[in-house]
Amino acid sequence: MIKLEKFDNTDFERLIKWADNEEMLVQFSGPIFKFPLTTEQLDDYLKEENRIPFKVIDTESKEALGHAEIYQSEDNLAKLCRILIGDAKYRGKGIGEKIVNLLVQYSFEELNVEKVELNVYDWNKQAIKCYEKSGFVINPDKISEIIVQEEVWISLNMIVTKDNWKIN
């Protein structure tokens, strides 16, 4: 079982340790941070009013397993961002799907938005499947790309509405 708790400056060191290479940092955060991640970047990150950052906590062990964020925009839309399961030993165990559902639930119930979106790199098939299980579908009209170490990464946009959300 997991829960979301507020992310603050006491969590910086752990997140910096998890984002230990450029590819991991970009996969997790997109272009918002520059490698290596620093406390100064995270200080600036927390100052943004529309960001709602969380640490993901295992309710039994009380261990922090990951990081996640909701970015609330003004057009009745929330965006899930910077979802990371920190330690590789916890990946592939369904935790990502639980995180996504908690974030979507928070967005619909606490922020009262009608739509939730996220971006995911097209090569990240496991994440795409995870998002589809929660009702997200690819929005073919919103695709972007970024260059990471001389390679082009294609970012797909996925969206779910209140009506199409599947609580698992």
Image: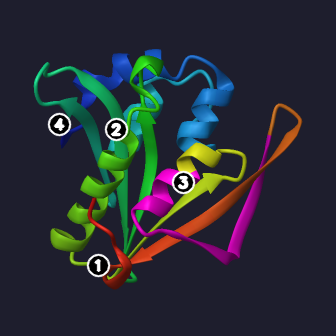
Q: Is residue 3 above or below residue 92?
A: below
Q: State the extent of the magenta-drawn residues as a range.
A: 128-147
Residue 34 in percent (x, y) is at 62, 32
Mark 1 neighbour class, 10 Å CA radius: few under 14, some 14 to 19, many 20 or more:
many
| Disc sitting over residue 95 in the figure | 2
Q: Which of the two discs, 1 and 2, sits closer to the camera?
A: 2
Counting from the top left corner in percent of width and height, residue 158 is at 55, 67
**Residue that numbered label 3 is attached to:** 129
Secondary structure at badge 4 equals loop
Helix, strand or loop status at disc 2: helix
Marks 4 and 1 sit apart, C-alpha to C-alpha, by 25 Å
What residue sits 23% from the left and 64% below the top? 105
**Chain-order first, disc 2 or disc 3:** 2
The residue under label 4 is which amino acid type?
A: Met
The quadrant of the rendering that contains the C terminus is bottom left
How far apart, in angstroms, are the residues tagged by discs 4 and 3?
21 Å
Q: Quadrant of residue 157?
A: bottom right
Q: Are marks 3 and 1 in contact (CB under 8 Å)?
A: no
Q: Establish if 1 lies above or below 162.
A: above
Give coordinates of residue 120: x percent, y percent.
60, 53
Q: If you read the primary sequence from the N terminus, does the residue marked by circle 4 or circle 1 appear first?
A: 4
Please report whichever mark, 2 or 4, sits nearer to the chain's N-terminal start: 4
Indicate which disc, 4 or 3, sits on the residue closer to the N terminus.
Answer: 4
| Disc number placed over residue 11 in the picture, else none | none
Whole-number angstrom distance, CA of label 2 to CA of label 3: 13 Å
